[in-house]
Image: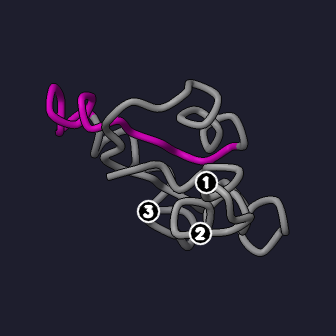
Amino acid sequence: AHCDTWPDNFTAASGHGTWVREAVVQEIVDAKHIISIGMRGPVDHDIRDWLANAGGFSLQMSQWMRQPNRCITSMAPWVTTMPIWFS
């Protein structure tokens, strides 16, 4: 999976990899209500970490593969206390 937190989509201002950032910046969704799981591949740290820095929850695929049970446990506060958007 790719990050959905890109500031743009190559030459376009908006695209399939920008929707999470757009929704948070435009205050459509509070970042605290977003969980993003399974990012992989090369990406700049500021883009990869954008959601977590905004208050959301983000897991890299490498984290999931090493410790899936720990990842599930770490998501519990999010999924048991509020509506969630998954990416």
1 or 2: mark nearer the eye: 1
Image location of residue 40, percent across then percent down: 31, 38
Q: Which amino acid, by three-letter code, is at mark 3?
A: Ser
| Residue 62 counted in the magenta span | yes
Could you classify mark 1 by the number of other residues whose Cα lies within 10 Å: few (under 14), some (14-19), or many (20 or more)?
Answer: few
Whichever of callouts 3 and 1 sits on the residue coming sooner in the sequence is 1
Secondary structure of residue under mark 2: loop
Q: Which mark is residue 87?
A: 3
**Residue found 40% across the figure and 47% down from its top:** 75
Residue bearing mark 1: 10
**Residue found 75% across the figure and 61% down from its top:** 24
Q: Nearer the viewer, residue 66 or 23?
A: 23
Q: Quick check: 70 left or right of 20?
A: left
Whole-angstrom CA distance, mark 3 to mark 2, is 14 Å
Relative to 45, is 80 above or below? below
Q: Which amino acid, by three-letter code, is at mark 1?
A: Phe
Image location of residue 37, percent across then percent down: 36, 50
Query: Is the residue under label 2 in contact with that under label 1 (CB below 8 Å)?
Result: yes
Could you classify mark 2 by the number of other residues whose Cα lies within 10 Å: few (under 14), some (14-19), or many (20 or more)?
Answer: some
Image location of residue 85, percent across then percent down: 51, 70
Q: Which mark is residue 15?
A: 2
Q: What segment carries the magenta color?
A: 55-70
Whichever of callouts 1 and 2 sits on the residue coming sooner in the sequence is 1
Q: Nearer the viewer, residue 42 or 55?
A: 42
Tally the marks.
Answer: 3
